Amino acid sequence: MAEPFDPLTDPAPAHDLRAVLRIRAFRRLWIGFGLSSLGDWIGLLALTAMAKSFAGDDYQLANFAIGGVLFLRVLPALVMGPVAGWIADRLDRRWTMIVGDMLRAALFVTIPIVHTLTWLLVATVLIEIVSLIWGPAKDASVPNLVPRHRLEAANQISLITTYGSALPAAALFTAITLLANNVERATGGLGVNSIDLAVYLNAATFAISGLAIMSVAEIGKAAASGPEKHPTLWRTMVEGWSFVTGTPVVRGLVVGISGAFAAGAVVIGLGRTYVEDLHAGDPGYGLLFGAVFGGLALGMGFAPRLFSGLSRRRLFAAGLVGAGIGLTGLALIQQIEIATMIAICLGFCAGASWVCGYTLLGLEVPDEVRGRTFAFVQSAVRTVLAVTLAIAPFAAGAIGRHSFSIGGGKTVTYNGAAITMLIAAVLAVVIGLLAWRQMDDRPGVPFLRDLRRSFGKTPGMYPTQGLFIALEGGEGAGKSTQSTALAGWLTEQGYEVLLTREPGATEFGQQLRQIVLDPATGDISHRAEALLYAADKAEHVDAVILPALRRGAVVITDRYVDSALAYQGSGRDLDQADVERVNRWATADLRPNLTILLDLAPAVGHGRFQRRDRIEAEPAEFHERVRRAFLELAAAEPQHYLVLDAGTDRETLAALIQARVAPMLPPKPDDDAAPAAAKAAADVRVRGEQEPVDKERAGQEQPW
């Protein structure tokens, strides 16, 4: 079971990776699947190198042998994927992983002993089938080993470990081959085979992984579930395909994610023959392999934070184009040193697109079809990988080597691998440009300006005393209803609660509210409007929010800085960077510990009002831009957001909010230590802030 959360002993932020690794059960599982991932990558390098050695000097046969190994590593997932997940959910997960690791170790040991291409291919299929069952058992175990508020950080560690372990695997493979080659030269050919040695090391990683997982007693069998929890393969594919093809944004994301994987797969599929023409041998292959996947891990881990000022949609499309440009450079460059640096950049761009694509899918896909859609995405990605890994080496072998005259009597020779990479690069750039055209959420705003302003973002100040919660969303999303319900629940738990709103939480703010919301105000300068809202925030933070937080209270505000960024930054024709800079300064960069975004289509929200104020009366296009801006802000820092479908019934929304807030709550105040006057004042403020709205709107949503 997950370890309970105690704010006194576990004060680290929810996204702190070190806090996750301090959980003993997860740490031991992490060591186990880290070793398994390391073994997977070493095995891929060793088996492709062994397949090449079986082919000898025949260029076409070498490409066909490597392509066969790579294709067979992916093929079982296309057939066995849903079946493997079904099996993993019905067996004891701990013993599934232990036995799986030991089976994979044994199978790898037999490959150099039998030493035939046929057995290499058969063993590859068997190993992949075991891995397909092992993987879901691991993924399903993680949520049971960490507290709910640490799950996102645990998944991030898992993702980085899975792909980042390719880098140490490449380093180990390179070191083994260099050592074995030096020993062979020094002893006149009496050294051990470097590839066989790598395969044995790979088998050892799986065996140690099984021993590490044996100590994680907290992993058990999956809870019983009905048949609807495990739809058939046909039903999963049909429903996933229907949703993807019928939703333009999701369709673009799936195509883009598949394109990012294809770009990396081309490099891996052709890397072995590519480095042969550069005379880099096995060490060069390991170096190139590590560069691609090291860059992939860096892109997944750091790109969203590094480019936090860039919208996720733009970063997704830009990463695809960048991967295509990198692949072009890799195809044209004939030096292993420069090619390695380009491969790192290519992997970084592909990793950025990968993580942004999955984040956007999580926001764009409704919860009721999310699982099936992701199952479809996984199948689509596997299919693209299988096709790419199978076709690329065969295409390279069919093209062969070609020499081109460049004038002055000089010639340049390119092999089929480089030419195939160049063709794939052109396709990747085209896919990226199509994704950009379909998904660009800031048309007319120069990309380079967006890119420049994405640097230099400050992390902001998150309160360490009390708890600061903001509710955001479009018109009619139900923020007032849910903030009142949350305040009532927290009060019942014994917490001091301050329920407030923007604009209008102070006397000064009420005057500003009258100006900006009254239809009689008419049109005013957009910059003036933004500055009025910023002035309200400055007074709100200094006079209301900070004093309550210093007392250790839970502060709940109906709207905060995100509303300014969404309404004035995206809804109006203002530069969002300027709006953000003004509002961050006005609030002293104080940020909520949690922002609850109630997402609702503008047409539905407006239907909840009988009359509209000055902002609500804006056209539908304005409110659509506002909605997209809210979702982008949430996608940029998911660890600080809870995004909910505001169309869900009130009771369910309240329960989901309470479940997310509960682990974040500070220690309850001591009744003797907390002055009664302060508590009474807080109660009065809750009533005093809500009463004008109740009279004006008769219980409807508060206007912005």
Image (cartoon, grey):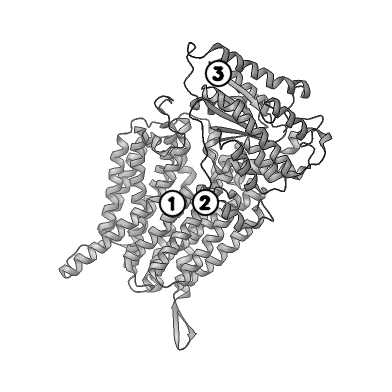
User: Which is more N-terminal, label 1 or label 2?
Assistant: 1
Does dot 1 land on a helix, a strand or a loop?
Answer: helix
Q: According to the image, label 3 marks what residue?
A: 496
Furthest residue in direction right, as rendered: 520
Observer-side mark, 2 or 3, equals 3
Amino acid tagged 3: Glu
Amino acid tagged 2: Trp
Residue 297 has which mark? 1
What's the distance in space between the residues labelled 1 and 3, CA to CA?
A: 43 Å
Q: Is residue 645 visible?
A: no
Residue 354 has which mark? 2
User: Which is more N-terminal, label 3 or label 2?
Assistant: 2
Q: Residue 582: where, in percent of width, then height?
A: 63, 42
Q: Is residue 310 visible?
A: yes
In the figure, 591 relative to 446: above or below?
above
Who is closer to the viewer here, 672 or 239?
A: 672
Q: Which of the 4 image quarters holds residue 124? A: bottom left
